[in-house]
Amino acid sequence: MPPWLQQLLPILLLLAAVSVVVSRLPRVELGHAPGFLKRRRWNWIVLGLAYSFLYFGRYNLSAIVAELEQAKILTKERFNELDAIGLGVYGVAFLLNGPLTDRWGGRATILIAAGGSALMNAGMALVMRALVDKSADAATLLQTLTVLNAANMYFQSFGAVSIVKVNAYWFHVRERGVLGGLFGILISLGLYFSYDWSLLLAREFGFVASFWAPSIVLGVMFVAAWFAVRDSPGKAGWKDFDTGDATSGQVHADPLGVVVRKLLAQRIVWILVAIEFCSGFLRQGAMKQFRPYAKAVGESGSFVYQNWGMLLCVAGILGGVFAGTISDHVFGSRRGPVASILYAGMLVAVIGCWAMLGTPGVGWSIVFLSLCVIGVHGMLSGTATADFGGTKNAGIITGVIDGFVYLGSSAQAWIYASALPTGDAAKSATNWTAWPGWMLPVVVVGLFLCTRVWNARPKPGGGH
C-alpha cells in the first residue's frame, strides 16, 4: 500500500464511522422536505469542500517551513515574521470583508476567496521557483513572497465568513451544533491536505509543487461553487424559512452602523471576541510550532511528525463531532458549556506539553490540544457567530470574531519569532519552555471567559 493511501485510509474510515454515528442521532424535526434536504446537502458539500481546500492554499507554506530551513531557503525566524504579517492582514481584513459578505452574499465571496487564493498561490509558486534556482536576489524574492502571502491571506479571509453566511440561511439554530461539528471536520480535512500533502508534494516534486497543487484545486472549486452554491433556499428554488436566530422576524437588514452598535452592545459578543483571540493564539501556537520544534530537537522521525496532517485531521474530526453533538443533544444548542469543556482539555494538554518537553509525549499533547481548539473554533466562529449575529448580520459578526482569531494567531507568531531558541540552542528541548510557557496563561484566560457564557442563548432582536 503506498504511503499516501496509508495516511488517507484512517481518515476515510473515521469519516465513515462519523457518518454512521451522526445518522443515528435523534433528528431535529423542522418539517424540511426530502428534496430540500437533498439540495441543502449538495449546497453544503460543494461550499464546504471549497472552504476546506482554502486551507490547502493557506497552510502549505507552514507545512514545508522546516524543509525550507534545512535547504537554507527560508529561516524559521523569517517565516514567523512573514507569517505574522499575513495573519495580521487576515485578521484586519475581516473588518472589511464581513460587511462585504453581508452585502454581496456568501456565494460571491467564496468565489472571490477561491479565485484570489488560486492566483496568489500560483504567484508564490513562481517566487519559490526563483528562490530554489537562485535566479534573482533572495532578499527581494522573500519580500515578494511576503506580499503575495499577505494578499493570499486577504482573499482567504472571505472563506469562513462566506460559509457561515450561506449556511445561516439554510440551517435553523437547533441544527447548527452538528453543523459546527461539520465545520470542524472541514478545517481538519484542509489541515490534512496542507500539512501532509504539501510536504509529500515538496519531497516528491520539489517545493514549487506545494503551491501549484492548491492553486489548481482551488481553480476547480471556483467552477464547482459557481454552478452549485446558492446563498439561500429561495435562490435555489425553495422557500426561505425562519432560522430562529438573533435576526429572526427581521425583514430588512439594518444599516452597517446600526448593526455594529447592536453587536457591540452585547456582552456576549465581547466575550466571544476575547475567547477566540485566545483560540487563535493556541491553535497556531500548536500547529505551526510543533514541526520546527520536533525538527530542531531530533524528533523528525517520530510518528507524530511524519503523520502530522493525518493526526490533526483525525483529532479535528473527533473534536468537531464531539462538540457539535453534545451542543445540540446534551446542552440544548448552547455553545458555552462545550467551549468550557474543550478549554479545560486544552489546559491539560498545555501542562502535558510543558512536562514532557524532550519526549515523544509532546507530539501527542499537541495533537490533543488541536482536537480541543478545533472543536472550540467550530462551535464559536462556525456556529455561535450565526446564532448571535443572526442570518442577516452573520458576515459582520463572523468577520469581527474570526478577525480576532487571527489577531491572536499573529500575536503568537510575533512572540515566538523572538521567544523561541535558534541555532544550536534550539537542539536542546530544555530551551523550548517558552513555547508552552506562553500558551499557559492564554489557555487559563480562555477557560475563565468560556465559563462566563455558559447559559448564553440568542434571542430575536439581537439580545441574549
Image (cartoon, rainbow, N blue to C red):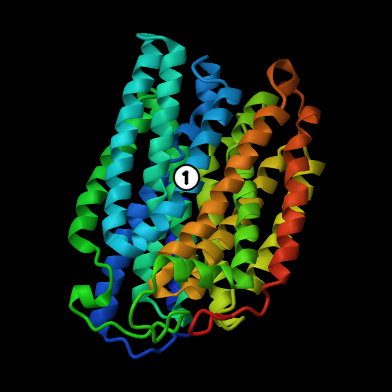
Which residue position holds label 1?
90
User: What x and y, as percent, mark residue 304?
Assistant: 60, 40
Q: Residue at x 27, y 68 (%)?
A: 231
Expressed as whole percent of the image width and height from the top left, the position of residue 442 reads 73, 51
Q: Which residue does the image show at 48% across and 85% down from the upper left?
A: 460
Count of marks, rendered view: 1
Vertical relation: 406 (above or below) 269: above
- Residue 432 occupies quadrant: top right
Q: Is residue 282 left or right of residue 23?
A: right
User: Hey, what amino acid is under mark 1?
Assistant: Tyr
Measured as percent of width and height from the top left, residue 249 is found at 39, 87
Position of 462 relative to 4 (above/below): below
Does residue 399 lie above or below 306 as drawn?
Answer: below
Q: Nearer the viewer, residue 219 or 94?
A: 94
User: Picture quarter containing residue 336?
Assistant: bottom right
Residue at image location 54% in from the left, 56% down from the top: 316
> Image quadrant for the C terminus?
bottom right
SS at badge 1: helix
Residue drawn at x 55%, y 66% is: 379
Q: Tell me if 106 is positioned left or right of 366 in this view.
A: left
Residue 365 placed where, x, y %? 70, 47
Is 140 located above or below residue 461 in the figure?
A: above
Observer-nearest residue: 316 or 128?
128
